[in-house]
């Protein structure tokens, strides 16, 4: 039975290759030129040298990130200290009458003291209970709080790397997202994020780039906000971290 199955799969594979060849030959004939059967030479790979050396000053990076992130519909706030960042989140939670807040299980986020500052709100820490349905808790959360690994000035993007304590659902499912970024983690180019990832022996389970709130125009080209993620995204850049 297994030999018959293997023969059948080989026949399907061969038939598929023949159809592919016929398709490509048909295109070449219409273009009136021979098929390219070998890979073209690529004398240059990756970003050019001048771009690898391009670096904005600290003030320029912050200004460019804010300009590009807000152009995509997000909000950028500055906080001198972690306490200031906590006050921003608490004020917004009060304004929205939030009932559920979910944060990543990071020591820095624990220092925000959201649980003590908002006793009337149910503040949970991702993955602190192995028996909990954390995707469901993220879906019901009014606010998600995450620690971003990088903020890229040139693209206006946040880079979020997932781990056991940094569940990606925290940034994907709540209605509103707060992403905290140390000022030292604001970089100029996307390559400054990607290059270290190339050097890792094992990549994180999820690597997400967030450029403003979720948006989609799949249905009749009608732009809709908040379909595949939070409809409101705040980045808080913290100076003293």
Image (cartoon, rainbow, N blue to C red):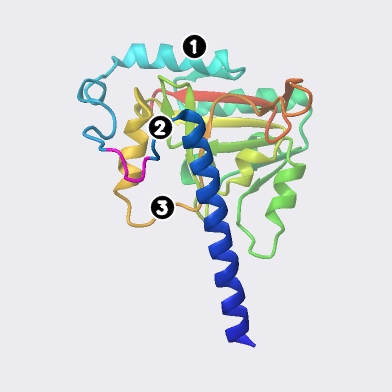
Q: Nearer the viewer, mark 3 or mark 2?
A: 2
Q: Residue 203 carries which label?
A: 3
Q: Nearer the viewer, mark 3 or mark 1?
A: 3
The residue to which callout 2 is attached is 33
Sequence-wise first label, 1 or 2: 2
Q: What stretch is highlighted in magenta?
A: 36-40
Q: Which residue appears at 61% of the width and 39% of the height?
A: 171
Element at badge 3?
A: loop
Q: Which of marks 1 and 2 is in front?
A: 2
The answer to whether the residues at label 3 and label 1 have Cβ atoms under 8 Å apart is no
The residue to which callout 1 is attached is 67
Sequence-wise first label, 3 or 1: 1
Find residue 184 and report its image quarter: top left
Compared with residue 176, is residue 199 higher up or lower down, i.e. above or below? below
Q: Position of residue 240 (x, y in %)?
A: 38, 26
Q: Which residue appears at 69% of the width and 40% of the height?
A: 173
Sequence-wise first label, 3 or 2: 2
Q: Which of 17 and 179 is in front in this view?
A: 17
Q: Which residue appears at 60% of the width and 57% of the height?
A: 128
Q: Does the magenta stretch include residue 120?
A: no
Compared with residue 79, is residue 132 higher up or lower down, i.e. above or below? below
């Amino acid at each position: 039975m297994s030999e018959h199955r293997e023969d059948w799969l080989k026949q399907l594979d061969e038939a598929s290759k023949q159809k592919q060849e016929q398709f490509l030959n048909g295109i070449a004939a219409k273009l009136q030129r021979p098929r390219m059967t070998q890979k073209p030479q690529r004398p240059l790979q990756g970003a050019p040298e001048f771009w690898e050396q391009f670096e904005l000053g600290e003030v320029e990076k912050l200004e460019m990130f804010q300009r590009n992130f807000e152009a995509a519909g997000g909000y950028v706030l500055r906080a001198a200290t972690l306490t200031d960042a906590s006050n921003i989140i608490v004020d917004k939670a009060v304004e929205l009458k939030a009932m559920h807040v979910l944060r990543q299980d990071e020591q820095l986020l624990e220092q925000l003291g959201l649980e003590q500052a908002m006793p009337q709100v149910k503040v949970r820490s991702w993955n602190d209970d192995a028996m909990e349905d954390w995707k469901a808790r993220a879906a019901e959360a009014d606010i998600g709080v995450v620690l971003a690994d990088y903020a890229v000035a040139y693209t206006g993007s946040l880079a979020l790397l997932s781990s056991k304590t940094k569940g990606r659902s925290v940034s994907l499912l709540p209605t509103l997202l707060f992403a905290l970024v140390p000022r030292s983690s604001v970089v100029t180019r996307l390559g400054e994020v990607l290059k270290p990832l190339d050097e890792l022996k094992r990549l994180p389970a999820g690597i997400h780039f967030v450029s403003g709130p979720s948006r989609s125009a799949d249905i009749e080209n009608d732009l809709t906000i908040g379909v595949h993620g939070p409809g409101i995204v705040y980045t808080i850049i913290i100076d003293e971290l």
